[in-house]
Image (cartoon, rainbow, N blue to C red):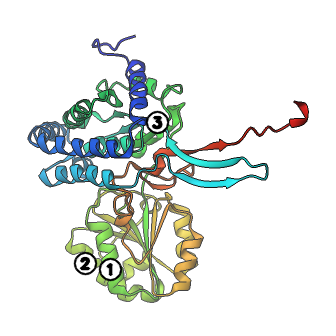
Amino acid sequence: MSGTDGTASIREQASRCREAAQQLAQLDTAAKDALLRSMARALDDDADAILAANAHDLDAARAKGIAGAMLDRLALDGKRLSGIAGALREVAALPDPVGQVTRRETRPNGIQVERVRVPLGVIAMIYEARPNVTADAAALCIKAGNGVILRGGSEAIHSNTAIASALQRAIGEAGLDPAVLTLVTDLRRETMLELLQLTDIVDLAIPRGGEGLIRFVAEHARVPVIKHYKGVCHLYVDRDADLGLALRLLLDGKASRPGVCNALETVLVHADVADEFLPRAAAALRARQVELRGDEATRALVPDAVPATTDDYAAEFLDLIIAARVVADLDAAIGHIRQYTSDHTEVIATRDEAVARRFVESLRSAVVMVNASSRFSDGGELGLGAEIGISTTRLHSYGPMGLEALTVERFVVRGEGQVRHPDLL
């Protein structure tokens, strides 16, 4: 059955992607790396067309009243586009996980058992106004030997189409079926629902976007889903913290780019240092147009702070807003985080190694930082190259997902004729 506009149905597109992925899986590392570098050059060559397409999307978004974090995620400029192309080159330079033997042992009967990384197969990316995902997901999936089906949001359709067109051209020039990277242009919800039912074709769905999108995908998919609902990231300033260091972590974590999931949303301050730290922090935040919302103890020290509600402590603001609370001790900080965490990223500022160790061991979030900014909770910053997403679901991958997360281990067994029941022969 074809789409309403005469294009191939989503099942037909997905099937072709799966077939193309078989071609990709036969490429060696050198060929895949050369392909990724060609894809990066194609982005450079098509920069003017991609930026023009993005300008079209931005104009349409502003006309719809879209602003703030979503507009920031949608926007491309020369520097961001160059960064996207650079990420493809970084992925090309990374070690190839495919074929990697992660464990080898010889059993008492002489058979040799290996665990070997192989591609997952076909990955469906469901995302919103994030045109960089089009290239990042393609790069990571292709390096890991997977086909990728990209279903972006309507707000970025022109940007995504221009980026995908450049990448597909490079894939075709390498002698591969461009369907290994399939961009879904039929953006009806019914089409996305059908894609999420294709258990015989799609091996994993990764949604990236707002909490509403991710819950919709998780609730309607029959294929496995990696979830990351939101990033409620905390900074705890311990009584033994270097307060200058803590302030740097706070400002970088909140004000450098507030519309991303690794931005800080709550700062917890030990009561012993609150009277020194909070007024200083409030002044620095105010200078950067950050609104501070605090509990009674915070407002006693910072009178112009907005009263914080329970909802504020659970919120992913994605804006120049941060919630603050004064806590009695480390246990109180841990208790607060456990109550409100989204299992994304937690940060402690302290010079006490025992306190840092207990903070790390007491929390189960995907990333825990000691004296480092939450903004490092990113695949690229943590050495994965471009990031396909951050998993807060405890499946085969947890935290920022790079190449290895797009492979699975299988068993390869080598023998010399061993049988399990020789007495029956």
Q: Is residue 153 above or below residue 337?
A: above
Which amino acid, mark 2? Ala
User: Which residue is painted at 31% across and 83% down in the image?
Assistant: 279
Q: Dot 1, how many residues are within 10 Å of its Cα: few (below 14), some (14-19), or many (20+)?
A: many
Residue where numbered disc 3 is placed: 217
> How far apart are the alpha carbons under marks 3 and 1?
38 Å
Q: Is residue 300 above or below residue 139?
A: below
N-terminal of the pair, mark 3 or mark 2, is 3
N-terminal of the pair, mark 1 or mark 2, is 1
Q: Dot 3, how many residues are within 10 Å of its Cα: few (below 14), some (14-19), or many (20+)?
A: many
Disc 1 and disc 2 in contact, CB within 8 angstroms: yes
Q: Position of residue 51 (x, y in %)?
A: 12, 42
Q: Helix, strand, or loop for circle 3?
A: helix
Q: Position of residue 100 (x, y in %)?
A: 50, 51
Q: Helix, strand, or loop for circle 2?
A: helix
Q: Position of residue 337 (x, y in %)?
A: 52, 67
Residue where numbered disc 1 is placed: 247
Q: Residue furthest right?
A: 423
Which amino acid, mark 1? Leu
> How far apart are the alpha carbons under marks 1 and 2?
8 Å
Which amino acid, mark 3? Val
Disc assigned to residue 310: none
Q: Nearer the viewer, mark 3 or mark 2?
A: 3
Q: Quadrant of the N terminus?
A: top left
Residue 328 seen: no
Residue 93 seen: yes
Q: Tell me: 254 left or right of 74.
A: right
